[in-house]
Image (spheres, grey):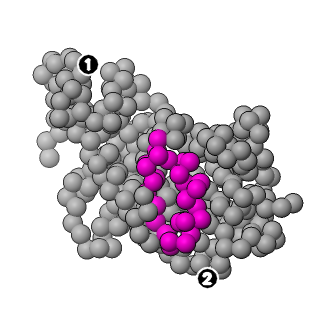
Amino acid sequence: MSAPQVSLLGLGRMGEPIARRLLAKLGDLTIWNRTPARAAGLVDAGAQVATTPAEAAAAVTLTVLTDLGDVEDLLRGPEGLIAGWVSAGVGRPVLVVHGTVSPVAVAALAQRLVAQGIDVVDAPLSGGVAGAESGALSVMVGGADAAVARAWPVLSVVGSTVRHLGPSGAGQVAKACNQVVVAATVTALAEALVLADAAGIDRAQLLELLGGGLAGSEVLRQKRDRWITGDFDGGGSAANQLKDLRFIAETAAARDLRLPVAATLHTVFEQAIADGDGALDHSAVELSLARHAQDRR
């Protein structure tokens, strides 16, 4: 079997709509998912399904997975990507890491793999599921110039704002910057609602006013209904937000930086997870803030 030109591994909340968009724009895509049933809808749309990661070893291979450890697991063994690239004779493949992972760890992975003739491009995403469906994602890219150039035609389909920011790890540093802003905005809005509730102010009206002024943001636009209805199921979890904040702390420490806002956010989300809200959307940090609003320490 000849090697595919483009493949995507990981059909979760972000991976499935990205795969659907790639298939529509490129006309050909090989997919793999640990749970094969998730690929059924894409098969109907014309995607080729690989039964192992090795069969999905393409010239440009995209991974949309939560942790870098999951990506590394796909590389190993006789059914892994490395074996697949070797067997198919794919010269200088590009492995694209779309998940939000440690900038330090992905740079180390890139250094290890380049010695085996494999280029790593870190390309974390911002814009959520809606952006994945429409192609309106921001794609923050790190990697060697030649590797990024080979992946660029694919990345430009994944997102509408694609920027190459520097060597391996640079994309993940940019995502860390993004996540400081997202976590801070979510937390600030949630805390504002705790204050509003205590003062007897209607939260729906408050959010409308905030949205029409300088406090307006994409975070407010996307999360507004959750705060009004109290439905925090699904979405980007508080646990993943804490994971990202840990990467931010690691990145800051590697550069000997003190980031007091990020450190405070880390503490806030640790409390939310300790309260049992880790699986809820990160906007549910409001629940933890409300519980502890009158704590005296």
Tell me which corner region of the image, top left, top right, bottom left or bottom right, holds residue 208: top left
- Which one is nearer the viewer's eye here, 112 or 268? 112
Residue under label 2: 115
- Measure the C-alpha gap from mark 2 to mark 1: 56 Å
Is 291 located above or below residue 28 in the figure? above
Q: Residues in magenta?
A: 136-162
Amino acid on which the number 2 mark rests in the picture:
Ala
Is 139 located above or below residue 137 in the figure? below
- Circle on res. 71: none
Please give the name of the residue rendered at 65% of the width and 61% of the height, measured from the top-left corner. 60
Residue 270 position in % (x across, y down): 34, 49
Give the mark toward the camera: 2 or 1. Answer: 2
Please give the name of the residue rendered at 42% of the width and 36% of the height, measured from the top-left corner. 281
* Residue 59 among those drawn in magenta: no
Q: Note whether residue 36 is visible.
A: no
In the image, taking residue 12 as reference, residue 215 lies left or right, namely left
Element on which disc 2 rests:
loop
> Within 10 Å of the Cα at label 1, are there few (<14), some (14-19), or many (20+) other Cα atoms?
some
Please give the name of the residue rendered at 32% of the width and 63% of the height, measured from the top-left corner. 249
In the image, taking residue 243 as reference, residue 90 lies left or right, namely right
Q: Earlier in the sequence, mark 2 or mark 1?
A: 2
Residue under label 1: 204
Element on which disc 1 rests:
helix
